[in-house]
Amino acid sequence: MSSEAFVTLATNDNYAIGAMVLASSLRKVGTQKHLFILITDNVSDKIREVLNKFFDTIQLVNLLKSPDPKILEALKRPELSVTLTKLYCWKLTQFTKCIFMDADTLVVQNIDELFERQELSAVPDIGWPDCFNSGVFVYQPSEQTFNNLIEMAARDGSFDGGDQGLLNQYFSDWSTKDIDHHLSFIYNMTLASTYSYLPAFKRFGKNVKVIHFLGSLKPWYCSYNASTKKLNTFIGNDHAREFIEKWWQMMVDNVHPVIEQLNIVGSMSSMAISNPNQPSSSITTTTADDDRYQAWQQGQMDYLGADSYDNIQKRLDQSIHGQQ
Ligand SMILES: O=c1ccn([C@@H]2O[C@H](COP(=O)(O)OP(=O)(O)O[C@H]3O[C@H](CO)[C@@H](O)[C@H](O)[C@H]3O)[C@@H](O)[C@H]2O)c(=O)[nH]1
Ligand SMILES: [Mn+2]
């Protein structure tokens, strides 16, 4: 077994779909590295079956039942539970070096060269470039580091309530200590950069190796027409659209056939690709009925049903009008 791995995390079926697309994209660019996913109880059995086809190892972690008192102490802050799950990647000491990638990333060129970098290497966050973005990072598994991180989470919390704040607190000299720990932006290009610095994107965009769909508009919330290879509705610039369509094309070409082969589309009563911020009833697509199944066969996949546009619109309204 290779001693180096790409590691991701999914705590629900939505992110698991993202993880499958990520894994497909990694294989498509020819990596031979181990593909590893951490999941929690909430990932459905059907989706786990599909994940098996994409990942070499699926590891279930269940923090809530963890016997470790330090973890339970930290879990008094429920919003940290997902954060702590990501930290579990440090426990994979069967590997000497790993690259953690968020489930909302897509690889478009081989990135195996990152295994030559040291812990902790990452890309500056475009919101505050003295902090790194924790969507892609090179690290070295270690029980000691894991314990230190959990201790810090329990003691100090995280300044942004997520793993990114905590990791930046822990690796606090990242921005000043060693420039070799700064990865090029091409390893974690966030879509917002196509809005905030378009000329740079036009000049360097072709070099991009990893796209990160950071923020609340995840590709799986968009509705895509596989016949026209276009998003059905999309508010945003053409570059962002192009990347989301790339994600969807990977989904249609590599993930959907596996789901179909396992006969999940026909047998599932509902496929809950839902947004945790919205009531799930309004955005659950029932795939069992014949009409939906036929639509799938014709490439008309609309995971979120007709309501997806409304939900995106609502979220955009919230950000434009500043309502939380
Ligand atoms: O309900 C959830 C939420 C997140 N994740 C996993 O955690 C990652 C991070 O969440 P994400 O929604 O991708 O966050 P971002 O929109 O990317 O926001 C930023 O803030 C997060 C919290 O600090 C960091 O984890 C991210 O790396 C950083 O890019 C995901 O990709 C998944 O792998 C789940 O499995 N389930
Ligand atoms: Mn992310």
Image (cartoon, rainbow, N blue to C red):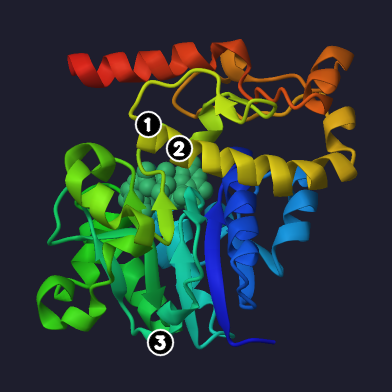
Q: Amino acid at mark 2?
A: Glu
Alpha-carbon span between mark 2 and mark 3: 31 Å
Q: Which secondary structure lies at badge 1?
A: helix
Q: Residue furthest left?
A: 176
Q: Amino acid at mark 1?
A: Asp
Residue 185, image quadrant: bottom left
Question: Which quadrant: the C terminus?
Answer: top left
Task: Decide: is 302 above or below 74.
Answer: above
Residue 314 percent location from the top left of the image: 37, 13
Q: Between disc 2 and disc 3, whose residue precedes? A: 3
Q: Amino acid at mark 3?
A: Glu
**Residue ID for mark 2:** 242
Residue 321 percent location from the top left of the image: 19, 14
Query: Who's the residue at 53% across and 36% down the image?
Result: 245
Residue 165 percent location from the top left of the image: 24, 56
Residue 230 percent location from the top left of the image: 56, 27
Query: Who's the residue at 88% across and 44% down the image?
Result: 261
Q: Quick check: marks 2 and 3 in contact, CB under 8 Å?
A: no
The label nearer to you, 2 versus 3, is 2
Report the side of 9 relative to 167 (left or right): right
Q: Between disc 1 and disc 3, whose residue precedes? A: 3
**Residue ID for mark 3:** 116
Q: Quick check: marks 2 and 1 in contact, CB under 8 Å?
A: yes
Q: Which secondary structure lies at badge 2?
A: helix
Report the side of 120 relative to 7 (left or right): left
Question: Which quadrant: the N terminus?
Answer: bottom right
